[in-house]
Every structure is written in C-alpha cells, then in structure tokens.
Amino acid sequence: MNRYKSAAWPLACLYAGLIVYASLYPFSGWRDLGVAPWAYLDAPLPRYWTRFDVGANLAGYAPLGFLLTLAMMRMRRGWPPLTLATLAAALLSFGMEALQTYLPARVPSNVDLALNAAGALVGNDKLRAKGRSDQILGHAEQAAENGVKRARKTADCIVEKAKESA
C-alpha cells in the first residue's frame, strides 16, 4: 500500500475526465465515416496550424503528466513514474484522437497526439526537475491544486474555442 495519502490519483482522474470532455465536445453527430480510427496516424502533416493549437495541446496535457507522475511516484513499482505517466497520457490522447474520427465537428491529428504526449512529458518533467520525490511530497497537495486550477482554465478556453468554431 501507499505510505502517504495523496489526492494525486483522484485529481489525475478528474483532470483526465476534463480532457475527455474537451476532446469530444460537442457530443452529437457521431457517425462512421468509413475511415479507420487510427488512420490519422499516417496522415500528412496539417497545412495550417495556430499557436493556440500548439499551446492548448501542450498546456492541456501538462497538468495530467504532473498529476500522474506524482501519483505513480508513491507506488514505487517497477517502471519509472515518468515513463508510465507519459505513456498513460499518450494512450489517452491516442484514444481521444481516434474517437474524434467519429465526430464530424472534430479533426483527429497526428500532430495533436505528439503535442499532447509532449505536454505530459513537460508536466512530469517539471515535477522531476524539482528534485527527489521525498522532497516533493510535502508540497504535492498545493501543486496538485494549482494544476487543477490551470487545467480548468485550459479546458474552459478549449471549450470556448470549440463553441466558436461550431
């Protein structure tokens, strides 16, 4: 069992829920377009991209990477927390991009997948850069709360952008 109680797992799950909501909004118009859900992986790079898209994808997954790494640091099992957290966030991103294939208002993108995974890596690297886990655990709750506040702002911004484009 864990040596310390932590809010990191519940906060990571809550934040992942926010990502699911923001990634699949609007929740209507689902249909099969006859394209494999993973077809976006070998699609050409998009012709156009905006700084907002890059920033939102990086910033959207950074708190998740941070929270997952923090939660996994307490488990003290085989794989390094940084690797597991990045892999978990990348798998979530893969799933969200694949599901966007069925939403006509959304466009799945291999660039989004890469930026989301990079955002998670940035988030968990911020935690690792602060030092050993024993030094971090005392400040973990405050850091998680700040991450959730930033996550809410990011999710609100993404939802507003989605509403504008709909």
Image: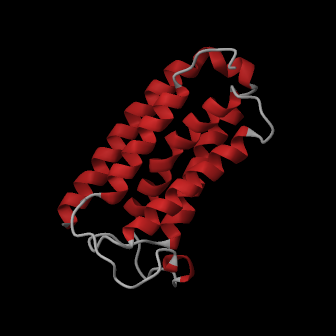
Residue at image position (30%, 70%) is: 103
- Return the x and y of residue 82 as percentages of the image width and height: 70, 42
Above-or-below relation of 146 to 20:
above
Q: How is the image coloured?
A: secondary structure
Q: Quadrant of the N terminus?
A: top right
Residue at image position (72%, 47%) is: 83
Q: Along the horizontal axis of the image, is 53 left or right of 74?
A: left
Q: Quadrant of the C terminus?
A: bottom left
Q: Along the horizontal axis of the image, is 39 left or right of 26?
A: right
Which of 104 and 59 lies nearest the eye of the viewer?
Answer: 104
- Return the x and y of residue 90 as percentages of the image width and height: 58, 56
- Return the x and y of residue 18 as percentages of the image width and height: 37, 44
Q: Along the horizontal axis of the image, is 26 left or right of 147?
A: left
Q: Quadrant of residue 124?
A: top right
Which of 113 and 149 lies nearest the eye of the viewer?
Answer: 113
- Return the x and y of residue 15 as percentages of the image width and height: 43, 39
Residue at image position (39%, 73%) is: 101
Above-or-below relation of 45 to 13:
below
How many numbered marks, from 0 up? 0
Which of 27 and 108 lies nearest the eye of the viewer?
Answer: 27
Above-or-below relation of 166 to 17:
below
